[in-house]
Amino acid sequence: MGQSWPQYDEAKMVEQTKELAVQINGKLKSTIQVPADAPDETVVEAAKADAKVARAMEGMEIVKTIVVKNRLVNLILRPKK
């Protein structure tokens, strides 16, 4: 008869990682890869660890962080006093 068709496994269709946009003051600076549904703290730390973002944060302080789950991170910065 031959071989049967492979079985559909929905768990394997779910993305394990997500690519998120990283914005500073609303302007796209970089993208990062994080685990799907990662906690906000993990996403923000990954964003701050990105080389382009770290360079843009020099001499600045974070006023606010906005995380849109599995989509983007926006860091609101202002110059340090």
Image (cartoon, helix red, strand yellow):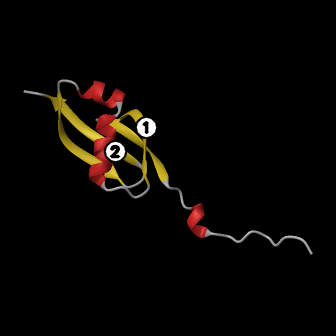
Q: Quadrant of the N terminus?
A: bottom right
Residue 32 appears left or right of 75 = right
Residue assigned mark 2? 73
Left or right: where does residue 59 sit relative to residue 42? left
Outermost residue, bottom direction? 1
Expressed as whole percent of the image width and height from the top left, the position of residue 70 reads 42, 53
Element under label 2? strand
> Would residue 54 be seen by someone viewing this image from the given angle?
yes
Give residue 31's mark. 1
Decide which of 65, 48 is in the foreground and name it.
48
Q: Earlier in the sequence, mark 1 or mark 2?
A: 1
Residue 74 lies in what quarter of the image?
top left
| Amino acid bearing label 1 | Thr
Q: Residue at x 54, y 61 (%)?
A: 14
Residue type at the position of mark 2: Val
- Quadrant assignment, res 49: top left
Residue 43 badge: none
Residue 26 visible: no
| Identity of the residue drawn at 79% across and 70% down | 5
Where residue 75 appears, as percent x and y from the top left, is 27, 39
**Secondary structure type for disc 1:** strand
